[in-house]
Image (tube, grey):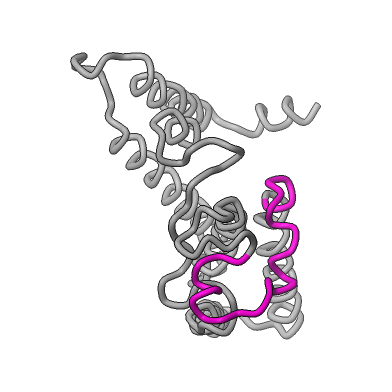
Amino acid sequence: MIAALVARSLDRGAIAFLALLGAIGILVPVLNLLLPTSSPLYLSSYFVALFGKYFCYALLALAIDLIWGFCGILSLGHGAFFALGGYAMGMYLMRQIGPRGVYAHPILPDFMVFLNWPELPIYWYGFQHFAYAAFMVVFVPGVLAFVFGWFAFRSRVTGVYLSIITQALTFALMLGFFRNNFGFGGNNGLTDFKDILGFNVQAPPTRAALF
């Protein structure tokens, strides 16, 4: 039912574009994993990661096109919501390091040990589980968007004023995350990722699958 409605709402150009994206999503990992390096069609792990970045930027561009092009709302704060989702997954990856970090602490990430944090902050609880982290990737930006949108549109803030407020929201979050006492890595952020679902994040098969 839903699939039929979506299909009827798409024109031929949109269907062709989605088919092209699907083909790229399949071909890029296949050309990296199944072809020998001597093949002219072989794609290195560098290009797999590069294509992944392009797709992330494409998602951001489509989001801006939806809210600005179709809804007429100029938002300059999309980076905040993307960053919150990224940090949620980054917190999971940090919890997977465990005692393999520089300071070999079984629970605390290296930057917390370096900054003499006595214990793991409560908002880091649960991020050792992938399902919880995947849920928070959607839930946290969604809650922020709902709260921000509720107050903004309830107060009938529109036009350039809304765009300035969204930019201010992004800047405020950036300043907060840059503080070392907030528990998000400060200026250095979250680094030294090792595993995701038990697979080495630097291994070519894992990089191709994450694409």
Give how far across and how far down residue 149 sits, in percent. 70, 73
Q: Position of residue 112 (x, y in %)?
A: 55, 74
Residue closest to the far right: 1
Q: How many marks?
A: 0
For residue 19, say whether it is visible: yes
Q: Is residue 127 left or right of residue 10?
A: right
Please name the residue shown 54% across and 58% down the image: 86
Is 53 in front, or is 180?
Answer: 180
* Residue 169 included in the magenta stretch of the image: no
Quarter occupied by residue 138: bottom right
Q: Is residue 168 left or right of residue 132?
A: left
Residue 132, magenta (yes or no): yes
Q: Name the spot of residue 52 as percent of width and height, x first.
A: 41, 41
- As displayed, is residue 201 above or below residue 75? above
Q: Is residue 71 visible?
A: no
Q: Which is more toward the observer, 210 or 206?
A: 206
Displayed quadrant of residue 71: bottom right
Q: Residue at x 41, y 27 (%)?
A: 24
Q: Looking at the figure, which quarter contains the N terminus? A: top right
Q: Between 170 and 201, which is closer to the camera in this rendering? A: 201
Please name whichever residue, 103 or 130, is drawn nearer the observer in this view of the structure: 103
Q: Is residue 187 placed above or below 134 in the rendered structure?
A: below
Relative to 98, residue 41 above or below: above
Question: At 45% across and 62% down in the image, what residue appears?
Answer: 102
* x and y, in percent, of residue 70 in the image: 56, 56
The magenta region covers 108-133
Is residue 138 positioned above or below 198 on the image? Answer: below
Please name the residue shown 41% across and 34% down the image: 203
